[in-house]
Image (cartoon, helix red, strand yellow):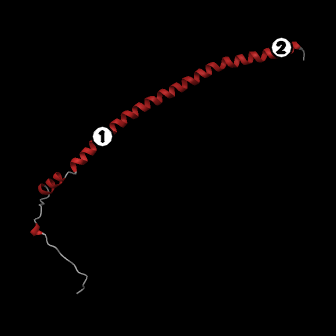
Amino acid sequence: MNRMTKLKIKDFFKVIGLCLFAASIPALLALYAVQAKKYTDLTKEVAELEVKQEKLIEENKKLVSDISQLSSAERIERIAVEELGMHKTEAEDIIRVEMTGEKK
């Protein structure tokens, strides 16, 4: 190959390289835009989940408080006496039964 042909080939590859570089800039910008959109969507989802978590924590606190109130000894005793007609037994009302291992 002569020198002129080598220069033309070299220039051709320079032009191709430059075109590829120029074409890669919009592609990289598009890729950046896609990543930015994903980041924005994930940030929004995290914020929504944090709000939901706060609501669930508050609801859980309320439920724990309700359980505490509903299982209090005073409440259970009041329901037993007022609604079920029960009363505390006296010591003399208790009958003890002992069983021995003997058969008759």
The number of numbered badges drawn on the structure is 2
The local secondary structure at tag 2 comes to helix
- Residue 31 placement (x, y as % from top left): 58, 24
Q: Where is mark 2, residue-wise?
A: 7
Instruction: Work out whether residue 101 or residue 25 is closer to the camera in this orientation and state it.
Output: 101
- Residue at left offset 80%, top offset 16%: 10
The local secondary structure at tag 1 comes to helix
Instruction: Work out whether residue 60 or residue 26 is closer to the camera in this orientation and state it.
Output: 60
Q: Where is mark 1, residue-wise?
A: 59
Horizontal side of 74 relative to 34 (left or right) equals left
Residue 33 in which image quadrant: top right
Q: Quadrant of the N terminus?
A: top right
Horizontal side of 47 relative to 90 (left or right) equals right
Q: Residues within 10 Å of mark 2 (few under 14, many from 20)?
A: few
- Residue 104 placement (x, y as % from top left): 22, 87
Q: Residues within 10 Å of mark 1 (few under 14, many from 20)?
A: few
